[in-house]
Amino acid sequence: MKVTLKVWRQKNAKAAGEFKTYTSPELNPNMSFLEMLDVLNEDLANRNEEPIAFDHDCREGICGTCSLVIDGKPHGPHKGVATCQTYMRSFSDGDEIVVEPWRAAPFPIVKDLVCDRKSFDRIQQAGGFISVRTGAAPDANSIPVPKEDADLAMDAAQCIGCGACVAACKNASAMLFVSAKVSHLGLMPQGQPERHRRVKAMVDQMDAEGFGSCTVTGSCEAVCPKEISLDFIARMNRDYAVALLKGDPKKIAGGGAG
């Protein structure tokens, strides 16, 4: 099969970008979308043209770096998968496919399809940790964890920080990402000492990075490759309200958690 690709090309963060059209070489329908880009780049290099820059690492749906908007949808046409798990058999011979990077001010374009997502790192650094005693590992049963809490924490911990939620949101909100990171620590007994300090610090950093507010349209949940639930946003908002009340009650009126 062959496809026509309209790809966003941008030399650097300061340069103006534009879509350029390419016809792919012959493709195997069972190759992944990223493998297709590899084949296209090899063809471009053979013709002494600049290859297309795109992010990738594990190619197993784990790392979250394969951040592409494909035909207007983050990660492509299917639900619950990353770009590296989208295969060319999802398209038909002769299709025109539009490929572009995440579109959000807190994710500035570095080159072509590569975005700078260090803003997510700064949010996690603002509060994504727990305090534990150093020394020998505690006995596995010394801190009992209710199964419901453990399951919810694992659901939240599945977030791979790809940023699809931001790319899909009309406000470029990072609430789904932040709520997952807040919840997977806040649900566990070990995460309780910093629970309210953590949520306030991470929400404040999210606001400082320029992410928009949440209007609960559900677009984030719809495109999340790990299908993180909107319920975590509600959980984070409750913790954020408590954090403000524990601090300065007057600040509750201006709250930053959407």
Image (cartoon, rainbow, N blue to C red):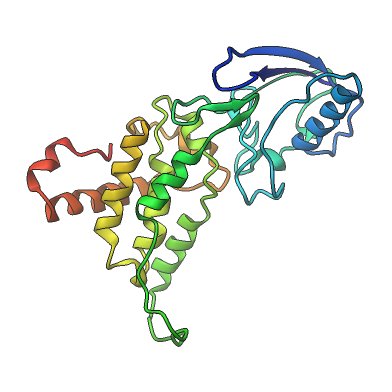
The residue positioned farthest toward the left in the image shown: 250
Q: Is residue 172 left or right of residue 240?
A: right
Tell me which corner region of the image, top left, top right, bottom left or bottom right, holds residue 97. top right
Across and down, in percent, residue 51 comes to 78, 25
The quadrant the N terminus occupies is top right
From the viewer's side, name the closer residue of 182 and 115. Answer: 115
Identify which residue is drawn at 55% across, 48% down: 226
Q: Is residue 200 left or right of residue 118?
A: left
Q: Residue at x 13, y 42 (%)?
A: 252
- Would residue 192 be found to the left or right of residue 90 on screen? left
Tell me where residue 247 appears, x and y as whole percent. Answer: 13, 53
- As drawn, 73 above or below 134: above
The residue lying toward the viewer, choosing from 196 and 83, is: 196
Q: Is residue 256 above or below residue 148?
A: above
Q: Quadrant of residue 5?
A: top right
At horizontal 33% and vertical 42% (from top left) the residue drawn is 205
Q: Which is more toward the observer, 197 or 189? A: 197
> How many numbered circles are shown?
0
Q: Quadrant of the C terminus?
A: top left
Question: Nearest the camera: 146 or 256?
Answer: 256
**Residue at left offset 49%, top offset 29%:** 168
- Quarter-of-image position of residue 150: bottom left
The image position of residue 133, as x and y in percent, is: 37, 79
Left or right: where 42 falls relative to 182: right
x and y percentages locating residue 171 in the rendered image: 39, 26
Location of residue 57 with respect to 90 vertically, above or below = below
